[in-house]
Amino acid sequence: MKVIVFGATGMVGQGVLRECLLAADVEAVVTVGRSRTGQANPKLREIVHADFLDFSTIAPQLAGFDACFFCLGVSSIGMAEADYRSVTYDVTLAAATTLAPLNPQMTFVYVTGIGTDSSAQGAVMWARIKGATENALLRLPFRSAYMFRPGVIQPLHGVRSKTGWVHAFYTLTGPLLWLWRTALPGRITTTEEVGRAMLAVVRLQPAERIIAPADILRLAQAPG
């Protein structure tokens, strides 16, 4: 398969990119970002693009793909609703509406989070905007679209968050996360499991479109 990864320099994106490059059935990976990942691999090609509300100038390079793993995201902490909506809903839909007509057989995988509000009407700002984004993606004419809603994600294999407080959290709590996985089964995943589960939904095309943490853990065990 040929895949596109948005947000490959973020914590989740780094893990997804690693699993794509390791997967035997992934022949080509294109990343789209504002900066390069710093990785070198024969499978990998990187597109550096500045305007994430307009992908028209690079659209010819985004055709002929089987999957898109959309891992871009920011914390809503301290953000006004209009700003959070712009970087969450508007950016995601700008990419997805560019990709859909170019790749009608594409599987689109979007990373949201546990607690996302599918009604898009609730009181929690980030949850309703994420819900509205999910709903819009599910209406687009892709082969399929999957909404990944992880909870706590443990970074592995040198993956780290670019957000200072997130990196500090994982640095401090890392030794405890394996204990928490035992105490809270099905709630904590790793970057490796998220990446493997994303590849699995492309291969298996499960009927369920909302992928919870327990689903991620199950799918990550599927043969690759």
Image (cartoon, rainbow, N blue to C red):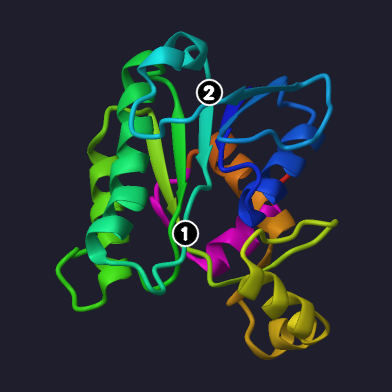
Q: Is residue 198 visible?
A: yes
Of the two numbered discs 1 and 2 on the same chain, state the one appearing first in sequence.
2
Query: In the drawing, does residue 114 fall left or right of residue 202?
Result: left
Task: Write the residue at 51% across / 33% down.
Answer: 68
> Which numbered marker is on residue 103?
none
Task: Write the residue at 46% across / 32% down.
Answer: 107
Task: Give 87 or 149, whichever is nearer the viewer.
Answer: 87
**Which percent across, then down, holds residue 6?**
54, 37
Give the quarter of the figure containing the N terminus. Answer: top right
Spot the residue most to the top: 60
Q: Secondary structure at mark 1?
A: loop
Task: Write the residue at 58% across / 26% down.
Answer: 48
Please tell me whether mark 1 or mark 2 is closer to you in this view.
Answer: 1
Q: Which residue is under mark 1?
A: 74
**Which percent across, then down, holds residue 89?**
30, 48
**Which percent across, then down, holds residue 152?**
59, 74
Q: Secondary structure at mark 2?
A: loop
Identify residue type, mark 2.
Asp
Q: Which residues are magenta?
A: 206-221
Residue 198, magenta (yes or no): no
User: 137 above or below 101?
Assistant: below
Query: In the drawing, does residue 46 fall left or right of residue 148?
Result: right
Q: Which residue is under mark 2?
A: 66
Q: Is residue 224 visible?
A: no
Category of crowding for the residue at label 1, using alpha-carbon neighbours closer than 10 angstroms: few (below 14), some (14–19), many (at least 20): few
Query: In the drawing, does residue 211 fall left or right of residue 36?
Result: left
